[in-house]
Structure formats: C-alpha cells, structure tokens
Amino acid sequence: MRTAMLRSMLSRRSSRGFSSSAAPERKVVVLGAAGGIGQPLSLLMKLNPLVSTLSLYDIVGTPGVAADVSHINTRSKVTGYAGEDQLGKALEGCDVVIIPAGVPRKPGMTRDDLFNINAGIVKSLSTAIAKYCPHAIVNMISNPVNSTVPIAAEVFKKAGTYDEKKLFGVTTLDVVRAKTFYAGKANVNVAEVNVPVVGGHAGITILPLFSQATPTANFSAEDIKALTKRTQDGGTEVVEAKAGKGSATLSMAYAGALFADACLKGLNGVPDVVECSFVQSTVTELPFFASKVRLGKNGVEEVFGLGSLSDFEKEGLEALKPELKSSIEKGIKFANAN
Ligand SMILES: NC(=O)c1ccc[n+]([C@@H]2O[C@H](COP(=O)([O-])OP(=O)(O)OC[C@H]3O[C@@H](n4cnc5c(N)ncnc54)[C@H](O)[C@@H]3O)[C@@H](O)[C@H]2O)c1
Ligand SMILES: O=C(O)C[C@H](O)C(=O)O
C-alpha cells in the first residue's frame, strides 16, 4: 500500500477530535524496534499523527531503523537507542510503551516454549519501565502474553509502581483474525464486522465469541467450531507457513498499531474507545483475563463482562481456565523467584 494511502487511513482513524497540530504531545517507545514486528510497527507508529516523539529501542540495529523511519514526513520526531545503557533515555517521559521484544516461535513450538527466554527479557524491561516511566501505559506483545503480563505486574508491584489500569496484554491480533475469518465465511464487508475475543492469547485460551458477532450470520455449529479453531490456531498457521522464519510480524504490527492508537485516543479523552485486551480482571475467578475494555485518560476505565454466551462458548470458557490459570501462576512465580 502506498504511504500516502496508509497515512490518510491512519490519520482518519486517529485524529478523531484532533488535527495533528492540536493533538497533545505524546511519546511512544517501541522496545524491540529492530525486530520482525518492531520494524513495521515503528513505521505504523511514525504514521500516527497522535505521536509527537517516537523512541525506538533494541539491543542492536536501532540506529538504522530509526534513521530510515525518521525520513518520513510525519509529525513525530524519531530517535533510535541501542543497548541497555540507552534504555533509560529511550523510556524517559513515555506515555505508551509497546513491547515486541523477545524470540518468536518456530514450527512445533508452543508460545509457552518461549517462556525461558522471553520471561527474563520482559522482567528486565519492566524493571526499567518502573524506573524511567512508571506512569506509562504498557502494551505487552511478547509471548507468552498469558505469562508476560503477570510478570510485568509483579515487577511493577515490587517497585511500587503497579497501576492495573495501565498494563495491557495485546490480543488485538486475535480480534483481527476473528473478524477476517468471520467476514470471509459470511461473505460480508469485513470493515463492518465486530467479534469480541476473550480469555488469553494461546491456543484454546483464545475464545472468540462468534455468538456476539455482528452483523449476524446463520452459521451451523460445525461452521462456528471451525471458525473458532482457525482463530485459536491463527498464530500457528503463520508459524508453519513461515517454516522456521518466525511468526506473525506484519499482521501483528498492524494489530499492535491499532491497539496503541486506541490507547492514545483514550489518553487524549476520545470517548467510547473499546478494544479487547488481556488485563487484570474480575470477570472470572482468574486474576488476568481478556475481554472488552473501555480505554480512557487513565488507561482502563471499565472492564466489560462477557455478555451472554452460547453453550459452545460456555464450554470453551471452562476448558481454557486451567491452562490460563497455570500460565498466569507461572509468570507470577518467575517474577518473584528471580
Ligand atoms: N501478542 C501477539 O499477538 C503476538 C503476535 C506475534 C508475535 N508475538 C511475539 O512478539 C515477540 C517478537 O516477535 P518478532 O517476530 O518481532 O521477533 P524478532 O526476533 O524478529 O524480533 C524481536 C526483537 O527483540 C529484540 N530484543 C531481544 N531482547 C531484547 C531486549 N532485552 N530489549 C529490547 N529488544 C530485545 C531483538 O533484538 C529483536 O530485534 C515474540 O515473543 C512473539 O512470540 C506476539
Ligand atoms: O503464534 C505466535 O507464536 C505469535 C503470535 O502469538 C500470534 O498469535 O501470531
């Protein structure tokens, strides 16, 4: 897609209520900016008129990405930071921190197989966030999200900076996929489709609520089962197609940019910004759970309940709880043991 088209698309989405010159100053940082997700996500954040300062951090490779992205003639000023000694500068004054830092899956792996490497990365980045931008909104992309979000929460609690309204596991890609697959099957305009996706972000913990999808479609139980499975296995579909060269990067960058844009709109006081996200929750007995949330000036303004579920979805909900509970507990245990 040509840059002008992308820019106009994003600015139409983003500037509701603001021209870019009237929008408040907002600093956004991408941690892991030189990676497969980080690079296209940095591009999309550069196109977002709600961003005034774009900070790009990675352990290596960020100067090149930052120089490249910085030539795009949009509002934000871009700075690249490479290596741990520059992490503080990258984070200072940030309103939104987006974290796609960490290793991706290869075929045959589960997201939990990434825990051993990514848990440590997320823990050290969260420690730095608590120190340098304790009031920032955090968008966690690094897998396994079901564990990395609880890790960040524990780190922030220990540092005395935890604000449950400001920590988000990014599950937007599940919603993006559910919308695409539903629209394709129903043969309706995907731009008009809405599907809540709840639970977590791994396998059966991803629970799309097709009974609440709009516009409604008359699908058989078998169709719903197949759509649910395809949504749950969407990440694996990409991992297998990439055959060892990583997982979803482009669709994830799109989803990450959508979610960060929603957070910025919320911060800027745009009303009725609602997205699904994995947050601290009392919707079920689990301490973290993805559901629809309303975003506002303080981050999460309201966590919505699940609404009415079909019998199939009720079964899915009960089935996902043990796995999600154990992934959450694994994250909490790691953060407190190390
Ligand atoms: N939430 C989701 O829906 C979703 C979707 C796709 C991928 N992911 C996850 O996102 C993560 C990144 O995927 P990718 O394809 O971009 O991987 P990648 O390997 O292409 O990029 C990761 C980047 O992180 C950087 N990095 C490593 N340690 C770091 C640290 N301590 N600080 C800063 N940067 C660091 C690497 O240098 C690299 O540039 C993976 O864990 C993947 O599973 C999540
Ligand atoms: O599947 C993965 O490992 C990456 C990501 O979580 C996804 O859903 O695409």
Image (cartoon, grey):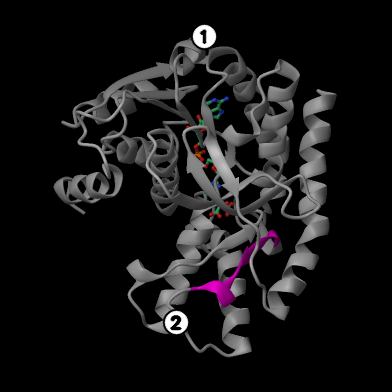
Q: Is residue 250 left or right of residue 305?
A: left
Q: Earlier in the sequence, mark 1 or mark 2?
A: 1
**Image location (x, y in percent) of residue 31:** 49, 28
Foreground tag (1 vs 2): 2
Residues in magenta, as a range: 205-213
In the displayed structure, would residue 185 be above or below residue 86? below
User: What residue is shown at x 80% (from left), y 31% (from top)?
Assistant: 334
Mark 1 nearby-residue class (10 Å; few <14, some 14–19, many ≥20): few
Seen at 52% across and 25% down, the residue is: 136
Q: Residue furthest top?
A: 85
Q: Which mark is residue 85?
A: 1
* Count of numbered badges drawn on the protein: 2
Q: Is residue 209 magenta?
A: yes
Q: Secondary structure at mark 2?
A: helix
Q: Quadrant of the N terminus?
A: bottom left
Residue at 77% across / 28% down in the picture? 335
Q: What amino acid type is highlighted by mark number 2?
A: Lys
Q: Which picture quadrant has residue 256?
A: top left
Is residue 104 visible from the viewing direction of this image? no
Q: From the viewer's perspective, is 80 left or right of 333?
A: left
Tell me the element at label 1. Answer: helix
Would you say 305 lies left or right of 23 here? right
Q: Which residue is mark 2?
A: 185
Of 263 and 62, nearer the camera is 263
Q: Is residue 89 above or below residue 193?
A: above
Can you give x and y, in whole percent of width and height, for residue 82 in the image?
A: 44, 17
Query: Quarter holding the C terminus?
Result: top right
Question: How far apart are the alpha carbons under marks 1 and 2?
Answer: 50 Å
Dot 2, how many residues are within 10 Å of its Cα: few (below 14), some (14-19), or many (20+)?
A: few
Residue type at mark 1 is Asp
